[in-house]
Image (cartoon, helix red, strand yellow):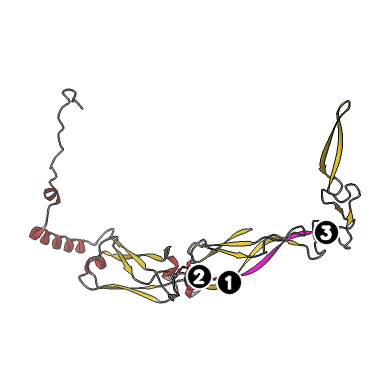
């Protein structure tokens, strides 16, 4: 029996002990799996407890065929019940909810399998199998509590590394002189900053060492202790949709000043033509 349990990224990062509930087939506790309200179970008198009967059919004069089929009186069970259990209606099993403890270790990979022995569907006729739990990452959602509202809630995980997009204004990307405090999955702050005059190009990726996911202890060698991946920060530059006339005038005059002083015309630098390129007329067939 296999089930999926969705876990927020925060729990994969910090580790946590929690619980989950499943619905499974269980042996009826009212009749202890007998199916009878008084505990009496009789052997079927039609099949003698075998659950099957043999019927003889004549196909032609002197030619007979024997067919084995389920006993129609006991339904193939070999037993009959005069007073069925009111809880399970004689089926001997019921559907019920069962809660299990779940320990999430720091750095566990997505899709890891946790096995609970003999906790699958039960039956009086066989030993219960294993319950296998697959841990999957839940979609990010802002919770109501403070620790559920960190920036890290929206980190994206890829193996041992985490990924984040930080938005910058045009002034910040162009002029620098800014600071960002990004709250991590455990609440600590990762500070991003640029000094005045430091330019950030759009889609630049900054790698912050050892601010990624903790590496699961089972994937470490020689008991290295706590080892972390990296945090990849991609900078997205947002340009203004419109500007005030005075601001636009100031920007234009500034750009014109430096364009005339040292500007480069890319078309000339790259050797691009001013008009369309004329192709030769098709005057015949070329040999290939």
Kindly identify which residue carries mark 1: 18
Return the residue found at the far left: 261
C-alpha span from label 1 to label 3:
35 Å
Nearer to me, 253 or 126: 126
| Dots 1, 2 in contact, CB < 8 A | yes
Q: Position of residue 60 (x, y in %)?
A: 86, 26
Q: Secondary structure at mark 1?
A: strand
Residue at position x 58%, y 72% from top? 18
Residue 89 lies in magenta, yes or no? yes
Marked residue nearer the N-terminal end (1 or 2): 2
Residue at position x 52%, y 71% from top? 105
Return the residue found at the far top: 284
94 sits to left or right of 207: right
Q: Position of residue 263 (x, y in %)?
A: 11, 57
Kindly identify which residue carries mark 2: 11
Task: Give the position of the N terminus as an image quadrant.
Answer: bottom right
Q: Secondary structure at mark 3?
A: loop
Q: Nearer the viewer, mark 3 or mark 2?
A: 3
Task: Give the position of the C terminus as an image quadrant.
Answer: top left
Marked residue nearer the N-terminal end (1 or 3): 1
- What is the quadrant of residue 245 in the picture? bottom left
Kindly identify which residue carries mark 3: 35
Marked residue nearer the N-terminal end (3 or 2): 2
Region of the chain picked out in magenta, as a range: 82-105
């Amino acid at each position: 029996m296999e089930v999926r349990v969705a876990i927020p990224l925060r729990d994969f990062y910090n580790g946590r002990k929690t619980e989950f509930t499943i619905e499974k087939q269980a042996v009826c506790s009212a009749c202890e799996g007998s199916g009878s309200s008084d505990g009496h179970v009789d052997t079927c008198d039609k099949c003698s407890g075998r659950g099957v009967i043999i019927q003889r059919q004549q196909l032609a004069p002197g030619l007979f065929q024997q067919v084995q089929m389920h006993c129609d009186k006991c339904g193939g069970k070999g037993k009959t019940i005069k007073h069925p259990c009111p809880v399970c209606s004689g089926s001997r099993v019921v559907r019920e909810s069962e809660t299990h403890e779940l320990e999430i270790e720091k750095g566990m990979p997505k899709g890891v399998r946790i096995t609970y022995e003999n906790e699958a569907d039960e039956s009086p006729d066989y030993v219960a199998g294993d319950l296998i739990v697959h841990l999957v990452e839940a979609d990010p959602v802002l919770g109501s509590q403070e620790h559920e509202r960190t920036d890290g809630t929206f980190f994206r995980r890829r193996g041992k590394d985490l990924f984040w997009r930080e938005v910058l204004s045009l002034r910040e990307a162009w002029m620098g002189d800014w600071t960002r405090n990004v709250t991590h999955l455990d609440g600590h702050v990762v500070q991003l900053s640029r000094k005045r005059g430091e330019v950030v190009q759009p889609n630049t990726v900054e790698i912050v060492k050892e601010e990624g996911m903790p590496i699961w202890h089972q994937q470490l060698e020689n008991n290295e202790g706590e080892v972390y991946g990296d945090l990849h920060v991609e900078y997205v530059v947002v340009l203004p949709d419109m500007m005030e006339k005075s601001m636009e005038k100031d920007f234009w005059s500034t750009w014109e000043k430096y364009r005339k002083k040292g500007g480069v015309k890319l078309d000339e630098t790259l050797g691009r033509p001013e008009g369309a390129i004329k192709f030769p007329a098709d005057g015949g067939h070329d040999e290939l």
